[in-house]
Image (cartoon, rainbow, N blue to C red):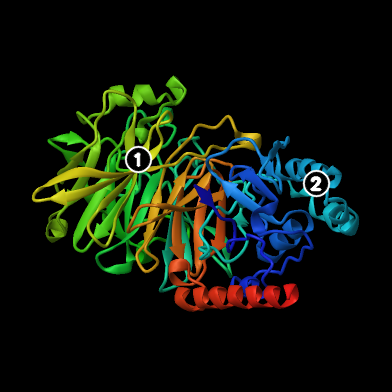
Amino acid sequence: MYITIPRALIVHFSLIFSQAFGLQECLSDRPGWPTHRTLHVSDKIVVGKYDDEWASALCCVYTHVEVSSSIDSPILELYDGSERKITGSTFSEIASDAMGKICVMSMGSDDCSENSECVDSAFTPADDRAISEVTFVQSADPIFSGELEVVSDDPRFVWLESPLWSTKDNYLLFSDVKWEDSSNNTCGMVWKYDEEQGVQEFLRCAGLAGPGNPPDNLPDLLEAGPNGLIWGWDGEDDLIMCQHGMQRIVRFDVGDVSVSGDITPNRVTVLVDSYNSKKMNGPNDLVLVGEDLYFTDPPFGLQARSTGGSLEHVFKVMPQDGVGVYMLKGEMRNEAPVTPTRVLDLSKPYVEGPNGITVTSNGNIVVSITNFTDPRVEVYSKSGDSWSLSQRMETPYRIEGNFSNFPPLTDGLTYSPDRELLFVAGPGGIYVFSSVTFERLSFLRIDDLTSNCEVGGGYLWITANSRLLRIPLANKKGSPPSSDANRYKQIFWGEITFCCMLLLILN
């Protein structure tokens, strides 16, 4: 299956065709249709270039470029259908080798002499993908509309999670699960970012905020901070937060947080802290669906310094008899703490657990599964009173470059109902799926541990290890301004015009 790069950058002779897709026109005096000389490359090595830059670079050398997820080695397909293998591990190296082969083939020398300056500037070592540069692997309708930006890599950041956008006040909250206090306890932080003030401390030791004493083993915990954040029943001042340190979910008004980053314990309400008279493993992520609160409860927050953060260890010491998805009935929220209902039992005889969660508009529960040998996203549909696995979404890419030794982590996710898209933080970057068909539409390469994401303020906000990133989104549903129908009409009539002109020339 072939996947296209930004705005279907497949070079064509027709000016009207190019205009319909908003691309630079590529001219060639070579015979045949666009596939008469095609470079096939893997989607794993494509550099993050954009629209006209891509078109300019590709027009220099190739008539047609296809980016495929099904090939590992690049191939140059010639006029007669024969193929030549291309060597190189980066796009620059592959482009250079392909250009060299084009220059020695029949009918290729003119391309090389005419475009040598363009080729030299288009394919330089600077084009090799660096950490956090974007790889687009998407449909013709763009999802993103600009470049990936590092908003902050503040040296105080440790392990960032769960960005949450305030539409009302235009700011972002996000968790830091491993932030340490002056005693080196990983009690965590909720950070705040806005355009005017930049990054600020919002709530210190957020993993322990509220009533109750810290756990006895706090000095040994690696991730005792906060994790999932959502707005609650009373709107965007009502914050609901998962706490790894206290193994519970709490709720409070953001207005009760002092300017020094503290909150009085009795201003924090404990919503959930146990199931079957045992402490929760460690609520991780959550979503409000109507009046009901759904959340995941893996034991990842129990990772200990004394065991080197072993995941096998946390599954042995977790208080519950398994992992799963739970639901708290909204009508009971004022009776908190409330014993939730286990909706999905996701226990397996090996180390894996549910992580991010959302629920789509048609009622499907979507859960990312953290399993370093089988990272994936699962979709559960309800029939009667029971839930069953209905879809499995793969996250096949892996981190490349400096951080290639990091594990393939599938972590948080977010749902954009107006775009009908699911954004998943997974191995290598952000995966974009249709929330209707669950087809993978796009991949945004980041090449770092990517923990979570959030749609807000015209951006997709991304927490990636110890950095806060963002990338601007295209308009709703990722559609270009003109409708698909009008665009295809333009393409159709453009092809008719081209064919008529060709017949006139031949006659």
Q: Is residue 373 visible?
A: yes
Q: Nearer the viewer, residue 454 or 251?
A: 454
Residue 145 point in image, percent of width and height: 57, 66
Q: Identity of the amino acid at label 2?
A: Ile
Label drawn at residue 52: none
Q: Residue at x 73, y 72 (%)?
A: 506
Q: Nearer the viewer, residue 63 or 454?
A: 63
Could you classify mark 2 by the number of other residues whose Cα lies within 10 Å: few (under 14), some (14-19), or many (20 or more)?
Answer: many
In the image: residue 112, left or right of residue 425: right
In the image: residue 186, left or right of residue 158: left
Residue that label 1 marks: 244
Residue that label 2 marks: 102
The relative height of residue 197 versus residue 363 in the rendered view (above or below) is: below
Q: Residue furthest left?
A: 384
Q: Nearer the viewer, residue 390 or 352?
A: 390
Q: Secondary structure at mark 1?
A: loop
Name the image quarter holding the C terminus. Answer: bottom right
Residue 55 point in image, percent of width and height: 70, 62
Which callout, 1 or 2, points to the residue nearer the camera?
2
Figure quadrant of residue 158 = top right
In the image: residue 480, left or right of residue 326: right
Residue 499 point in image, percent of width and height: 64, 73
Q: Identity of the amino acid at label 1?
A: His
